[in-house]
C-alpha cells in the first residue's frame, strides 16, 4: 500500500485527509499526475513530500511499497 495525505485546501478539495492506494510500480510524477486528473487539481498549486522530505523533481523517483506521499498547499513561515 501507498499512503497519500492531503493538507489544507487540498484536503477540502479532495474531501479526505488521507487515502491508501494499492501498490503498483510507477514514478512519483505519474502518481501526482493521476491524482491531478482524479481530483481535478490541475489549477491547484502544491508541494510534494515523499516520506517526510520535500521533493523538487519527481520524474526519476520510483515509488516503493509503504511510501508516504503528502500534498501540501503553498506555505510561508518565519
Image (cartoon, rainbow, N blue to C red):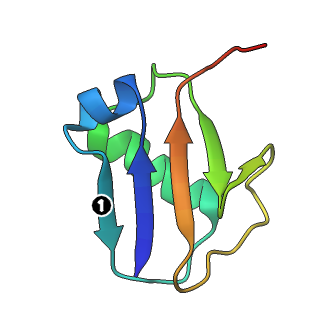
**Front in this rendered view, residue 62 or 7:** 7
Indicate the position of residue 32 as horizontal and vertical percent values: 52, 50
Would you place residue 32 above or below residue 69 in this image? above
Question: Which residue occupies the extreme front position in the image?
Answer: 78
Q: Depth check: 69 or 23 in front?
A: 69
Q: Position of residue 71 (x, y in %)?
A: 51, 42
The 10 Å Cα crowd at callout 1, few under 14, some 14 to 19, many 20 or more, is: few
* Residue at the image position 45 percent from the left and 19 percent from the top: 43
In the image, residue 37 sits, relative to residue 67, either above or below, namely above
Compared across the picture, whether 9 is left or right of 60 comes to: left
Along the horizontal axis of the image, is 49 left or right of 4?
Answer: right
* Residue at x 60% of width, y 20% of height: 74
For mark 1, what is the residue?
A: 19
Question: What secondary structure is found at the residue carrying circle 1?
Answer: strand
Q: Residue at x 52, y 82 (%)?
A: 66
40 to the left or right of 4: left
Residue in the picture at 80% in, 48% down = 57
Name of the residue lying farthest toward the left: 15
Q: Classify the position of the C terminus by image quarter.
A: top right
Instruction: Compare residues 11 and 62 and report the one nearer the observer.
Output: 11
Query: Where does residue 35 sit, x and y in percent of width and height?
Result: 40, 49
Which quadrant of the figure has residue 51? bottom right
- Residue 60 lies, in percent from the top left, at 79, 65
Amino acid at each position: 500500500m501507498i499512503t497519500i495525505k492531503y493538507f489544507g485546501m487540498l484536503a477540502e478539495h479532495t474531501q479526505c485527509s488521507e487515502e491508501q492506494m494499492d501498490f503498483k510500480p510507477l514514478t512519483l510524477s505519474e502518481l501526482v499526475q493521476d491524482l491531478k486528473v482524479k481530483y481535478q487539481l490541475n489549477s491547484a498549486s502544491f508541494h510534494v513530500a515523499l516520506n517526510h522530505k520535500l521533493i523538487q523533481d519527481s520524474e526519476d523517483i520510483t515509488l516503493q511499497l509503504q511510501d508516504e506521499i503528502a500534498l501540501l498547499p503553498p506555505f510561508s513561515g518565519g
